[in-house]
Image (tube, rainbow, N blue to C red):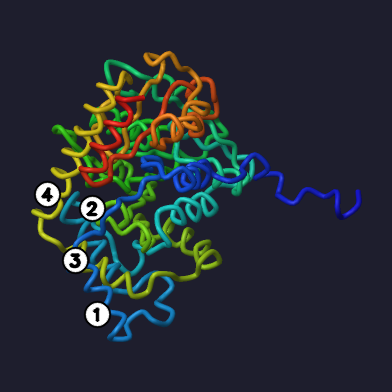
Amino acid sequence: MTSSARPHLNRRLAEFGTTIFAEMSALAVATGSINLGQGFPDTDGPEEIREAAVRALRDGRGNQYPPGPGIPELRTAIAAHQQRRYGLACDPDTEVLVTAGATEAIAASLLALVEPGDEVVALEPYYDSYAASIAMAGGKRVPVTLRPHEGSFRLDLDELRAAVTDRTRLLLINTPHNPTGTVLTREELAAIAELAVERDLLVVTDEVYEHLVFDGAEHLPPAAFPGMRERTVSIGSAGKTFSFTGWKVGWVTGPRELVGAVRAVKQFLTYVSAGPFQYAVAEALALPDSYFEEFRRSMRERRDILADGLTAAGFEVFRPAGTYFITTDIRPLGEKDGFAFCRALPERAGVVAIPNAVFYDDREAGAPFVRFAFCKREEVLREAAERLRAM
């Protein structure tokens, strides 16, 4: 084989090209459409937290390399948050690691904990970086599909148990769940914990939407269940909670041995990041409960504006219990191909959405589902709803 004929992408990553988010965001710009595809807010977070970042810049804090595990102030704030919210005690020096967003935390965790050939069980549909990170680690992903049931997507615990084999190394759990908006219940999480303990599995939990739960749903960290503290790596993020997604400040918490393994990988990825923003996020995590309550209330209202508009436009709507995404079924509109629907939607209605099939191994299972983001200003959501109704 000549050099020019060699593949330019590692075989493990050959199935992964440009993400659908880049494609659809570019389409939104090209058509002047309302972008309800990629999950980023169209307003900034609290002014006092922005000012904290400016203050850190001016004071020269974080303008050079911060400590590899993250600045002490932020690690202490993360540990305090876990203790205050969930009763989980973490040593800020050895059991907390700051990362370049949750995406790096996921990649570093899987690269650290998965050996080539290990099976990783993940809840499908799943955030697209899961599949890529498992592939980079040389693991084999094993999906367990959340299926529509009585207006939401639910986990079949028998299917989860059946997916675990002697080759299973790790469970990758996402709650609140993107893209379906499902929040796993206490009973479901207890069953997952029992399974993990019984089969001696590691667990990585993506909890970036922990503060976005609605209608009486409760976020319960899997690490808080019996037998889980010593086997669980928990992942959080400031981007979704404080509406500063561009800052890319995430974190990992867990037992010393597991966090140490993740840190060993993370140091060869970004090494460090977001120096001045780490000081601001440390202050954000100490905001009073009223901030988090108002944040949830505001997002719940936006969810309802878009959900009502989508229903009026003829979609079947799965009203989420968490996150800031709504999954819809396009079959009541006479459609069945989410990719074709989303690629045509900007011209038809001036709105951009994401086909859920990109989050499935079984593309056919996800074909009729389309995801919309409601983390936008209310007037933008109302305009999008009007455009969709007129389609």
Of tags 3 and 2, the one toward the viewer is: 3
In the image, is residue 226 above or below residue 283?
above
SS at badge 2: loop
What amino acid is found at the position of numbered circle 3 in the picture?
Answer: Glu
Q: Which residue is mark 4?
A: 294
Is 13 situated left or right of 79 in this image?
A: right
Q: Which residue is mark 3?
A: 47
Mark 2 → mark 4, Cα distance in angstroms: 24 Å
Determine crowd level at label 1: few under 14, some 14-19, many 20+ residues with C-alpha closer than 10 A: some
**Closer to us: 134 or 49:** 49
Residue 263 picture location, percent across and down: 46, 63
SS at badge 1: helix
Which quadrant does the C terminus fall into?
Answer: top left
Q: Earlier in the sequence, mark 1 or mark 2?
A: 1
What amino acid is found at the position of numbered circle 2 in the picture?
Answer: Leu
In the image, is residue 212 above or below residue 331?
below
